[in-house]
Image (spheres, grey):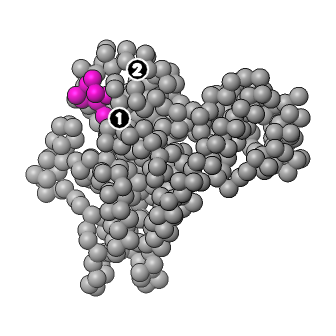
């Protein structure tokens, strides 16, 4: 996208264009390892100042090959969304977001200096109307969505979003795969992989603190935007990098996830079965199409009452209330795992019948 290429070109002309340095092994006058405790064990500086990049670069190159994009490690999903969206939101840009995107995405958009618009959750007709009216007024438009929404477990219509994006030369598609990574796709790369859309999505955000059982996140994007985020994403520039030991752990867990095809199949089947059972108990359609299954209570006190009934049955399920969800949509949010079986969940269904009735 030319607007971001122009910013990079300006930085280059002003001799301010930065890149991640290769590993350095001379006398260390770079890091903040003031007491000498962190040698070979911690970053003690941001990636732009970090002395040993071996583990970070190894993992990024592995992810590059998997996604067919350039990847950039970040310290968390929050860091990734706040840094990327605030950097993308410059004068001359419009960010159009689904109303149910995660708080980290909302915060990133608010920190930016571009214009914003929102569409009703998964309402492609409304999105089309916004773009038809406004897209031509901007140098760049970013559509920001999640692939799996964290509170309802429903899916973004990625195929239609890609079709819409193709209609506008200045539109980029930004997808947070936090709750899809590990669960969807042949290799667990997310809903984008499952639908064969990896090459069509311009910016993919993945957190490593959920299915990966690690810590951190990464952005998968184009060569231009990779360089742009290195230079303009403040949460990347001004945060101490994760220690090499954490990066090595993440790499090991990602490698394990890639081969868990059978576990993904089992989780998908278990989730589908459980959703139908929940529908039979509640008498209402479950919007979820994932391992995240909401049990709507309708009020904060009812959500607390339901959580208490499940807790008495030895089941942990916390009530979700404002500001995480809107008033009147309070719920329990149940997250299934490939390590569970129907036998594990039958007592949950029994406790739910009691709690709801």
**Residue tagged 1:** 173
The reply to whether callout 2 and callout 1 are in contact (CB within 8 Å) is no
Identify the image quadrant of the N terminus: top left
Residue 116, x across and y down, in percent? 38, 27
Query: Which residues, given as a range, are shown in magenta?
Result: 165-172
Q: Residue at x 41, y 65 (%)?
A: 241
Q: Which mark is residue 192?
A: none
Label 2: how many residues lie within 10 Å, few (<14), some (14-19) or many (20+)?
many
Q: Residue at x 28, y 82 (%)?
A: 25
Residue 21, x across and y down, in percent? 25, 68
Above-or-below relation of 242 to 71:
below
**Residue tagged 2:** 127
Q: Secondary structure at mark 2?
A: helix
Residue found at the very far left of the displayed protein = 13
Q: Residue at x 24, y 20 (%)?
A: 136
Q: Residue at x 71, y 32 (%)?
A: 276
Residue 26, x across and y down, in percent? 26, 84
Identify the image quadrant of the C terminus: top right
Q: Is residue 97 magenta?
A: no
Q: Secondary structure at mark 1?
A: strand
Q: Give residue 30's quadrant in the image.
A: bottom left
Q: Is residue 107 visible?
A: no
């Amino acid at each position: 996208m030319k607007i971001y290429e122009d910013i990079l070109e300006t930085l280059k002309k002003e001799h301010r264009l930065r890149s991640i340095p290769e590993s350095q092994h001379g006398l260390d006058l770079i890091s903040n390892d003031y007491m000498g405790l962190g040698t070979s064990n911690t970053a003690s500086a941001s990636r732009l100042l970090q002395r040993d990049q071996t583990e970070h670069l190894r993992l990024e190159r592995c992810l590059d090959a998997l996604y067919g994009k350039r990847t950039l490690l970040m310290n968390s999903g929050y860091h990734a969304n706040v840094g990327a969206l605030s950097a993308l939101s410059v004068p001359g840009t419009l960010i159009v977001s689904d109303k149910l995107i995660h708080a980290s995405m909302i915060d990133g958009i608010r920190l930016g200096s571009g214009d914003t618009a929102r569409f009703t959750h998964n309402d492609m007709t409304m999105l089309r109307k916004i773009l038809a009216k406004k897209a031509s007024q901007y140098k760049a438009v970013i559509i920001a969505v999640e692939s799996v929404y964290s509170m309802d477990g429903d899916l973004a219509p990625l195929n239609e979003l890609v079709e819409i994006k193709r209609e506008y030369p200045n539109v980029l598609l930004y997808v947070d795969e936090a709750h899809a990574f590990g669960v969807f796709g042949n290799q667990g790369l997310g809903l984008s992989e499952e639908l064969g859309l990896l090459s069509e999505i311009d910016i993919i955000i993945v957190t490593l603190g959920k299915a990966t059982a690690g810590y951190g996140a990464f952005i998968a994007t184009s060569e231009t935007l990779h360089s742009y985020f290195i230079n303009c994403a403040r949460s990347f520039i001004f945060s101490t990098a994760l220690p090499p030991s954490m990066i090595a752990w993440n790499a090991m867990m990602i490698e394990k996830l890639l081969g868990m095809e059978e576990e993904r199949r089992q989780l998908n089947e278990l989730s589908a079965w459980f959703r139908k059972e929940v529908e039979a108990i509640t008498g209402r359609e479950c919007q979820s199409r994932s391992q995240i299954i909401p049990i709507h209570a309708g009020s904060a006190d009812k959500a607390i009452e339901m959580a208490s009934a499940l807790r008495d049955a030895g089941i942990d399920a916390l009530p979700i209330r404002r500001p995480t969800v809107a008033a009147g949509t309070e719920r329990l949010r149940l997250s299934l795992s490939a390590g569970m079986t129907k036998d594990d969940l039958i007592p949950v269904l029994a406790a739910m019948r009691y709690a709801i009735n």
